[in-house]
Image (cartoon, helix red, strand yellow):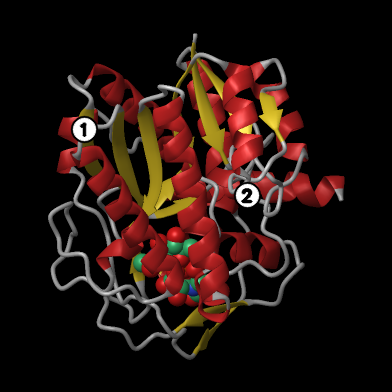
Amino acid sequence: MKKIIVTGGAGFIGSHTVVELAAAGFTPVIVDNFSNSDRSALEGLKKIIGSEPVCYAIDGNDYAAMEEMFRKEGDVVGAIHFAAYKAVGESVQKPIDYFRNNLNSLLVLMDLMVKYKAPNLVFSSSCTVYGQPEKLPVNEQSPILPAQSPYGSTKQICEEIIKQTTSVKQPLKAISLRYFNPIGAHPSANIGELPIGTPNNLVPFITQSAVGLRPPVTVFGNDYNTPDGSCVRDYIHVVDLAKAHVKALQLLDKAEGTTYYDVFNVGTGRGNTVLEVIKAFEEATGKKLGYKIGPRRSGDVEKIYAEVEKSRDGLGWQAELSLQDGLRDAWRWQQKLTNNA
Ligand code: UD1
């Protein structure tokens, strides 16, 4: 049973990845300071995997606490680093917080991975590194364009730190996974997304609007150069996304030598507009959704979706679930939250 540290393991993508790690025979060790996650995720995980995962309620920036965790756990073989600040708008207000938290926690983790000989790192990156792409779909060779926000900049810089560090002789191998737009929840509805306050992301806003917690959805702009004028994104089911992390760890484990770094897109290869997502939600759930058209949101990219050949051939991974699956599972999770409230 190979032990893997999962920073941010109580969060949305982290918790789903803990499920897939356990199913694949790994022993996940969660590190989470619960600043943007909830302890109830641990109970949800217990229902799915049969026992509560080991969890350290510590901050990834706290070197001493992280080192104590490495020492206690002993035979760790790698880490998946999810824990980070992730709100684009907030990052513009608090750039220093974003740079300090997102860069420093990575440095602490990498330092300890080298020291404690846990060589395999999977990093949570984002398609935001491509900025506003000129050519679609984007592949891993597409240019890294100027970041639109400090948040996006932290992802670019973290990727660069990992690339530089793994290119010199260090016992550290790494893969950055560039996520497109994660949606959905575990089909059991025991874990899912738990946004604090008003959701910034489209799908949690839709599900909260559908239960009456929020007003009708505002579509941010319908005058883009897209089939219906609203923005295009590549919506990937969180369970599919979680499975890509297991594949990445397995690839790292097999990689020869002590230095290895690669980058993979994790998307479906399909783009959908905001209006298509609203329609698909209505179809998948039978629930009518009110919406209105509003102005563009500043910083939004017009359209982006993934080229998926490299992850299919290199990782041996591809998305299996549909947009409808994601919306149905997100809705099931929202209904459970609402019924338990
Ligand atoms: C962005 C980043 C992504 C990052 C994420 C973090 C890009 C291409 N993507 O995702 O890397 O991880 O932020 O939050 O930079 N929308 C509405 N009404 C709403 C909410 C959203 O119309 O109430 C639209 C947006 O304009 C966008 C789409 O829905 O076109 C998806 O938005 P959102 O879920 O916020 O994700 P991104 O902005 O694509």
Report if residue 23 is visible in the image. yes
Q: Residue under label 2, please give it.
A: 193
- Label 2 secondary element: loop
Q: Quadrant of residue 145?
A: bottom left
Mark 1, secondary structure of its residue: loop
Residue 214 in the image: above or below residue 74 = below
Query: What residue is shown at x 60% (from left), y 65% (from top)?
Result: 206
Q: Nearer the viewer, residue 37 or 136?
A: 37
Mark 1 burial class by Cα count in 10 Å: few <14, some 14-19, many 20+: few
Residue 252 in picture, x, y percent from top left: 28, 25
Q: Is mark 2 within 8 Å of ligand 1?
A: no
- With respect to residue 286, does 245 lie above or below? above
> Residue placed at 72% from the left, 23% from the top?
47
User: How far across and how far down the image is residue 319, in percent?
Assistant: 33, 38
Q: How many marks?
A: 2
Image check: 200 left or right of 246? right
Q: Which mark is drawn over residue 59?
A: none
| Residue 237 shown left or right of residue 140 in the figure | right
Please tell me which residue is depicted at 39% across the width and 85% down the height of the picture.
Answer: 222
Q: For this view, does 128 lie left or right of residue 204? A: left
The residue wearing badge 1 is 169
Q: Could you give the CA–CA distance between mark 2 and mark 1, rounded to whole angstroms?
A: 39 Å
Against 249, is 324 above or below?
below
Q: Position of residue 177 (x, y in %)?
A: 33, 44
**For residue 128, which quarter of the picture?**
bottom left
